[in-house]
Image (tube, helix red, strand yellow):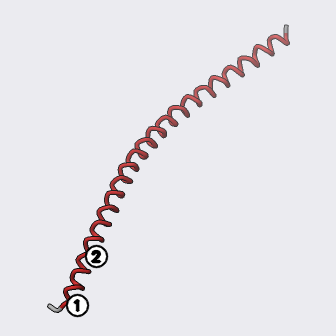
Amino acid sequence: MDEEMMDAAEEAGADAIGEAVAAEAIHEDAVEKAAEAAVLIETAEELAAEAVVEEAVAEELGDEALVDAVAADALASEAEGE
């Protein structure tokens, strides 16, 4: 091999090492982001479950409020009749 080819081979090797280091860093970042995404998904699922429960409670309270309003209206009508 002549010196030019040797230099080109060394440069290509150095480039390959640099690219491998960069690829490893990108991979580590991707793994970290995937772990963060898993945590966010779990949190979102928990919040969605809480929202379902809160919606059910809100519906129940709304129904109770309607019953109370009807009772109040009946009592007011009775009070007017007396």
Work out whether residue 11 or residue 31 is closer to the camera in this orientation and state it: 11
Q: Nearer the viewer, residue 6 or 38?
A: 6
Task: Farthest residue to the top: give it.
Answer: 82
In the image, residue 67 sits, relative to residue 11, either above or below, namely: above
Give the residue at x 23% y 85%: 7
State the residue at coordinates (33%, 55%).
Answer: 31
| View extreme (front): residue | 3
Q: Is residue 78 above or below residue 41?
A: above
Q: Residues within 10 Å of mark 2 (few under 14, many from 20)?
A: few
| Along the viewing direction, whichever of 30 and 55 lies nearer the viewer | 30
Residue drawn where x is 19% and y is 86% of the image:
6
Q: Are the two marked residues, 1 and 2, in contact with CB atoms closer than 8 angstroms?
A: no
Q: Is 41 left, or right, of 66 in this rendering? A: left
Amino acid type at mark 2:
Asp
Give the residue pinned by disc 2: 15
> Which x, y percent locates residue 25?
32, 61
Q: Amino acid at mark 1?
A: Glu
Report which residue position mark 1 lands on: 4
On screen, residue 46 versus residue 65, left or right, reads: left
Coordinates of residue 1 in the picture (x, y in percent) = 14, 90
> Where the C terminus falls, by quadrant?
top right
Q: Secondary structure at mark 1?
A: helix
Judge by depth and name the residue closer to the eye, 72 or 30: 30
- Image quadrant in which you'd find residue 20: bottom left
Q: In the structure shown, which secondary structural element does the residue marked by tag 2 occupy?
A: helix
Lower position in the chain sequence, tag 1 or tag 2: 1
- For this view, does 68 lie left or right of residue 7? right
Using the rendered view, name the quadrant where residue 26 is placed. bottom left
Residue shown at 66%/24% (left/top)?
Answer: 65
